[in-house]
Amino acid sequence: MTPSALADLVRSSAVEVLSARGLDHSVLPDPVTVERPRNPEHGDYATNVAMQVAKKVGLTPREFAEALAEALAATDGVEAAEVAGPGFLNLRLAADAQGELVTRVLAAGDAYGRGDALAGVKINLEFVSANPTGPIHLGGTRWAAVGDALGRVLDAQGAAVTREYYFNDAGAQIDRFVGSLVAAAQGAATPEDGYAGSYINDIAAEVMRKEPSALTLPEDERDELFRRIGVGLMFEEIKSSLHEFGTDFDVYFHEDSLHSSGEVGKVVEDLKESGSLYPADNAWWLRSTEHGDDKDRVVIKSDGNPAYIAGDLAYLRDKIGRGFELCIYMLGADHHGYVARLKAAAAAMGHDPDVVEVLIGQMVNLVSDGKPVRMSKRAGTVVTMEDLVEAVGVDAARYELARYSVDSSLDIDLDLLRKHSNENPVYYVQYAHARLASLLRNAAELGIERAADVDLGLLTHAREGDLIRTIGEFPSVLTKAAELREPHRVARYLESLASAYHKFYDVARVLPQGDEEATPLTHARLALCEAARQVLANGLSLLGVSAPERM
């Protein structure tokens, strides 16, 4: 019996109890909350539904809980139902009913845990979107791990997710990048506001290799050549780095296309016509305060050039025009002001502001030997994705970055992530999977194959029950992770599952030894182990982390 099935059973029993007394059962929540108690001695699951609704129907919480306990205790699959305190209800499941969950996991395989809470919802998930002026730094690397994991979690709830990278190939930062490349090609010092690092020299040299006469061209032609080739080389490197990190995108959208196609001009004219833009101080302003922003925003500057938000307006309209019902933006810590302005942009164009959702990620720092790691071998001023991967590998980097809420700053301990011990979270989870895979290989070598009819009611040990109940939490963890946009919940769950398995393994012998024969309990425990392995693999896959068979 899964937690959701138990919740349905509690609710249906509560409906019967109230109906038998002629009381209104519409006050019952749907779904009823069923949770595992902190103290396992209190039972397998607990619910406070009696305390939630009793007074609404004229009963005391304890009176309702006692009637509900009596009804549930008479139900197949429920071994005991006991009232505690003012009206809590503690439940113990029969071993065979609880063991049914193992069968369900084995039947579902890779699909176990997936749901349909977001079935058919078209979501545009934009993340990383680093400027093409240098290698991806740690903030972008965090988004590459978290964004990719979030996309997988949303997929697992039935959403139609498009992963999108907004390529900022227009604006002053590109001009500074081009100036830096030209200076490097000339052997001159980096411009005061330019970009430094060996990567600039590498790209400049590649431009010169492709176009040996580049520096002899008129300045405008020279700069355009360095822009076209240099930005292209940088972007290809960024895409390659992301691919090696396990993060790929469905769409690479070029900011410059919004300007060259005239879409920026069109959205500005449409907003002028609708009255959402107004002139003041020789500029055009978006009435964003009417939609919750703290101030109106300049869209067309006094010099006649579009402000950055003009591109944002055209980009959002393009997304909505492509049929996306939800546009999620994953932005850095310095972009808090974008939350209100993007929602205001949606409202100004006549859409529900909730079509826009903005997630803000905090800073990431590297620590080694207790000291900050600041300098990159290649970028010079920042630590990059390649630096992190070189130090700890893709799996450890992705897992560690996805393991924490993006609301908090993160210090990554390189020394910890290099350890092959249980102190290292990714090793702890992957080792549990490898240990299970080894156990199942050993069973096969002993000639023990999965039995067609397994008596899962034999799984009566406390550690077996704990492992089964932990496995049963996986679907609800995924639902909540998708709902709250928090893939770190998956990582934390996997650690609890690995812990439950290790504790089970320490007290429950699975395989026969010596001349012993496999027993029905052997087959039941092997089925449980295979279910645990499957869920660990499913969860790691959602984080984009491998599930090794051997370690």
Image: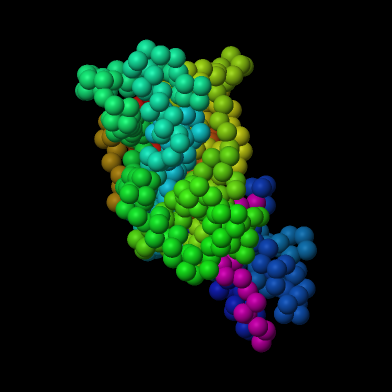
Residue 2 x, y percent position in the rendering = 49, 58
In this view, 185 is above or below 412:
above
Q: Which quadrant, please, contains the C terminus?
A: top left
Up-down relation of residue 315 to residue 331 (above or below) = below
Give the color scheme: rainbow, by chain, secondary structure or one colour: rainbow
Residue 33 on the magenta segment = yes
Residue at x 57%, y 70% (from the top left corner): 30
Tell me the magenta residue range: 21-37
Left/right placement of residue 343 relative to residue 56 reads left
The residue under the point 56% across, 54% down is 282
The answer, for residue 458, to whether it is visible in the render is no
Camera-side residue of 376 and 514: 376
Between 465 and 497, the one lying in front of the other is 497
Where's residue 523, x and y in %?
Answer: 37, 43
Q: Which secondary structure type mostly characterizes the magenta part of the structure?
A: loop
Occupied quadrant, residue 83: bottom right
When asked about the image quadrant of residue 333, the answer is: top right
498 displayed left or right of 264: right
Judging depth in this view, the residue of 78 and 225 nearest the camera is 225
Q: Is residue 517 magenta?
A: no
Can you see residue 451? yes
Q: Is residue 217 left or right of residue 336?
A: left
Relative height, residue 361 to residue 477 (above, below) = above
Q: Residue at x 38, y 46 (%)?
A: 255
Residue 236 percent across, percent down from the top left: 30, 32
For residue 420, side relative to residue 38 (left or right): left
In the image, what residue occupies the spot 62% across and 79% down?
26
Q: Which residue lies furthest to the bottom in this view?
A: 22
Does 365 appear above or below 76? above
Q: How many marks?
A: 0
Task: Please tell me in which quadrant of the rendered image residue 188 appears.
Answer: top left
Give the image location of residue 448, x and y in percent: 29, 38
